[in-house]
């Protein structure tokens, strides 16, 4: 299980994300720059114990209304080959030393474990406590076998990030989050699996929504 170290990280992930977020096509903040706070998320374990995997929910309060975003991240002890465009930034970890933080949608380790979570082969872990399952994270799969393999294309757009797998299946990672009606989850038509969970809003509410949706069949 991943171990959560109580130590310093310089610069912090929120500082790195403040610089990185405005470059994303799904970010809809103002020109003054993001004002971010961490409001939820969960972790997954890398079976090899080499890569940190975190699904961080942040809220940007720089605009007229707060906007929550999902940012999947991986933390590595060395650069990921071929992923320069997905680098969020580097930071000095008080225990682990220099770490390279990546947009996890471009990291095959995160994608593999996210599919394993959807299929019930992996378990969501608490964001800030070692060796503790996060029971608030929901997942489902309606099928016989969750697709494996790597993403052949990763496309960022205003609606989120789409990953097309070698099998032809597609995985949409939502970036801007919104609450599911009636507590949800309410999956889009044709969806075969999902991951969802809660986050905190500045007004004290704690909505739930979809984080990722899997389609095992290509759209008609």
Image (cartoon, rainbow, N blue to C red):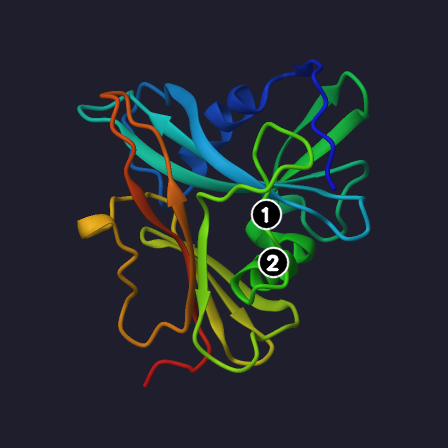
Whole-percent x, y for residue 173 in the image: 44, 55
Residue sitting nearer the eye, 99 or 19: 99
Count neighbours of disc 2 (C-alpha within 10 A) and say few if under 14, some if 14 to 19, many if 20 or more.
Answer: many
Q: Is residue 61 visible?
A: yes
Q: Residue at x 24, y 49 (%)?
A: 183
Outermost residue toward the bottom? 220
Q: Residue at x 60, y 77 (%)?
A: 166
Q: Tell me if residue 40 comes above or below residue 49 in the rendering.
A: above
Q: Tell me if residue 53 comes above or below residue 40 in the rendering.
A: below
Q: How many marks?
A: 2
Label 1 with label 2: CB-CB less than 8 Å: yes
What residue does disc 1 label?
A: 104
Q: Is residue 55 visible?
A: no
Measured Cα–Cα span from mark 1 to mark 2: 7 Å
Residue sitting nearer the eye, 136 or 6: 136
Q: Which mark is residue 111?
A: 2
Count neighbours of disc 1 (C-alpha within 10 A) and say few if under 14, some if 14 to 19, many if 20 or more.
Answer: many
Q: Residue at x 32, y 54 (%)?
A: 159
Q: Residue 208 appears in which quarter of the rendering?
A: top left
Whole-percent x, y for residue 127 in the image: 57, 33
120 on left or right of 76? left
Q: Quadrant of the C terminus?
A: bottom left
Q: Residue at x 81, y 25 (%)?
A: 96
Q: Secondary structure at mark 1?
A: helix
Residue sitting nearer the eye, 73 or 1: 1
């Amino acid at each position: 299980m991943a171990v959560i170290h109580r130590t310093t990280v310089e610069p912090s992930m929120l500082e790195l994300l403040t610089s990185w977020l405005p470059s994303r096509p799904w970010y809809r903040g103002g020109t003054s720059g993001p004002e971010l706070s961490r409001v939820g998320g969960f972790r997954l374990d890398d079976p090899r114990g080499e890569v940190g995997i975190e699904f961080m929910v942040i809220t940007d309060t720089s605009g007229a209304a707060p906007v929550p975003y999902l940012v999947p991240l991986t933390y590595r002890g060395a650069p990921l080959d071929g992923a320069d465009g997905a680098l969020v930034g580097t930071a000095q970890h008080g225990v682990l030393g220099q770490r390279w933080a990546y947009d996890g949608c471009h990291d095959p380790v995160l994608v593999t474990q996210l599919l394993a979570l959807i299929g019930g082969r992996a378990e969501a872990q608490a964001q800030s406590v070692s060796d503790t399952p996060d029971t608030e994270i929901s997942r489902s799969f309606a099928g016989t076998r969750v697709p494996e393999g790597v993403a052949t294309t990763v496309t960022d757009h205003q609606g989120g990030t789409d990953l097309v797998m070698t099998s032809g299946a597609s995985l949409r990672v939502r970036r801007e989050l919104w609450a599911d009606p009636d507590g949800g989850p309410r999956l889009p038509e044709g969806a075969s699996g999902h991951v969802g969970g809660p986050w905190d809003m500045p007004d004290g509410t704690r909505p739930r929504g979809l984080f990722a949706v899997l389609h095992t069949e290509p759209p008609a």
